[in-house]
């Protein structure tokens, strides 16, 4: 066959071939240096394909106060129907219900100290073994706070996290984000000076700042997170922990987290 005949044959049949492989097809522009073509082909073929096997997400979202952990967790939860496991909320429930664990934890919470793993881990294990978490997976926020806690979580059979996200945000941005939040004491609605201002002057006049959004409180909570940040980062860097700049708009952060959930990890698959 002549060159013209080969090109004609290719153009005649390539459309059908593309249709057959459209789920895995990746087009590369060949009108560039050969090394660039090779690099793009190698990069694509080196990626692990997404698995179509059923999988249960076990997601940990870490970050300091003001990083938007709860907001992102709620967005992921709504879209993928995954229950949120908030460890601070879990601790509060135990204290309010005056369970044996709650009684033990109350003194630590009052002193703003870390609850011992010997008290906390059984509560976490029981929650993660409930039907909703077993069937749908889970999104954990507020834990782990130390490397030791991360190691304790990984030791629970079948419950090691499959994704760990670090929402990184500078202190000044976190302070600005939180200190400009206000609360309507009548409706419970939250507002923000710039991002979500109150619709009327009457509402604006009755708004109050939540005590936890005070500047000194925000700074203190932020610093408490940074104490253990390096050891957590070192620990999860071995497990493909994903860092995301959280000083972006909430939807952009959500998209980055979502991409980290649905795409395979570099080393360990899902």
Image (spheres, rainbow, N blue to C red):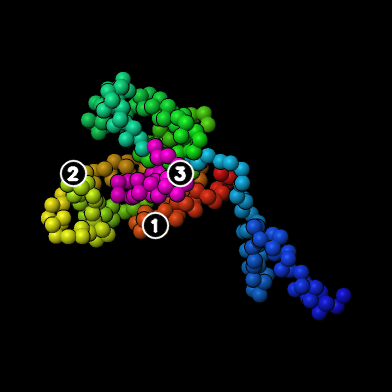
Query: Looking at the image, is mark 2 or mark 1 nearer the viewer?
Result: 1
Q: Position of residue 121 (x, y in %)?
A: 40, 27
Query: Looking at the image, is mark 3 or mark 2 nearer the viewer?
Result: 3
Q: Which residue is mark 3?
A: 81
Say left or right for 34 vs 194. Answer: right
Tell me the element at label 2. Answer: helix
Labels 3 and 2: the sequence-earlier one: 3
Q: In which quadrant will I find the N terminus?
A: bottom right
| Label of residue 211 in the image | 2
| Label of residue 182 in the image | none
Residue 214 is covered by the magenta coloring: no
> Is the Cβ of the residue at disc 2 closer than 8 Å to that at disc 1?
no
> Is the Cβ of the residue at disc 3 closer than 8 Å to that at disc 1?
no
Please report the residue visible at 38 percent of the width from the left and 46 percent of the height from the top: 74
The magenta-colored residue range is: 60-85
Say left or right for 267 vs 206. Answer: right
Residue 6 sits in quarter:
bottom right
Q: CA distance from mark 3 to mark 2?
A: 32 Å
Q: Position of residue 3 (x, y in %)?
A: 82, 78
In depth, the one of 57 and 245 nearer the eye is 57
| Label of residue 251 in the image | 1
Tell me the element at label 1. Answer: helix
Query: Looking at the image, is mark 3 or mark 1 nearer the viewer?
Result: 3
Note whether residue 10 is visible. Answer: yes
Q: CA distance from mark 2 to mark 1?
A: 27 Å
Return the residue found at the far right.
1
In depth, the one of 65 and 75 nearer the eye is 75
């Amino acid at each position: 066959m002549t060159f013209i005949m080969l090109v004609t044959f290719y153009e005649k049949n390539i459309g059908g071939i593309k249709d057959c492989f459209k789920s895995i097809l990746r087009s590369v522009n060949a009108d560039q240096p050969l090394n660039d073509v090779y690099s793009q082909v190698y990069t694509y073929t080196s990626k692990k394909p997404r698995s179509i096997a059923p999988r249960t997400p076990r997601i940990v979202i870490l970050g300091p106060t003001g990083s938007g952990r709860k907001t992102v967790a709620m967005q992921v939860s709504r879209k993928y129907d995954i229950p949120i496991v908030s460890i601070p909320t879990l601790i509060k429930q135990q204290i309010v219900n005056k369970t044996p664990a709650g009684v033990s934890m109350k003194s630590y919470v009052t002193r703003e100290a870390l609850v011992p793993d010997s008290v906390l881990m059984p509560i976490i294990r029981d929650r993660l073994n409930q039907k909703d978490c077993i069937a749908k997976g889970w999104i954990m926020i507020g834990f782990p706070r130390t490397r030791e806690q991360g190691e304790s979580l990984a030791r629970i059979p079948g419950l090691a996290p499959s994704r760990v996200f670090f929402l990184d945000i500078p202190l000044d941005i976190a302070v600005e984000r939180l200190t400009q939040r206000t609360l309507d004491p009548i409706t419970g609605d939250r507002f923000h000076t710039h991002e979500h201002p109150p619709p009327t002057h009457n509402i604006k006049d009755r708004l109050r700042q939540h005590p936890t959004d005070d500047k000194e409180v925000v700074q203190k909570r932020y610093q408490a997170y940074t104490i253990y940040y390096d050891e957590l980062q070192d620990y999860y860097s071995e497990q493909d922990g994903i860092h995301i700049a959280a000083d972006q708009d909430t939807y952009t952060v959500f998209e980055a987290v979502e991409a980290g959930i649905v795409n395979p990890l570099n080393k360990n698959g899902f």
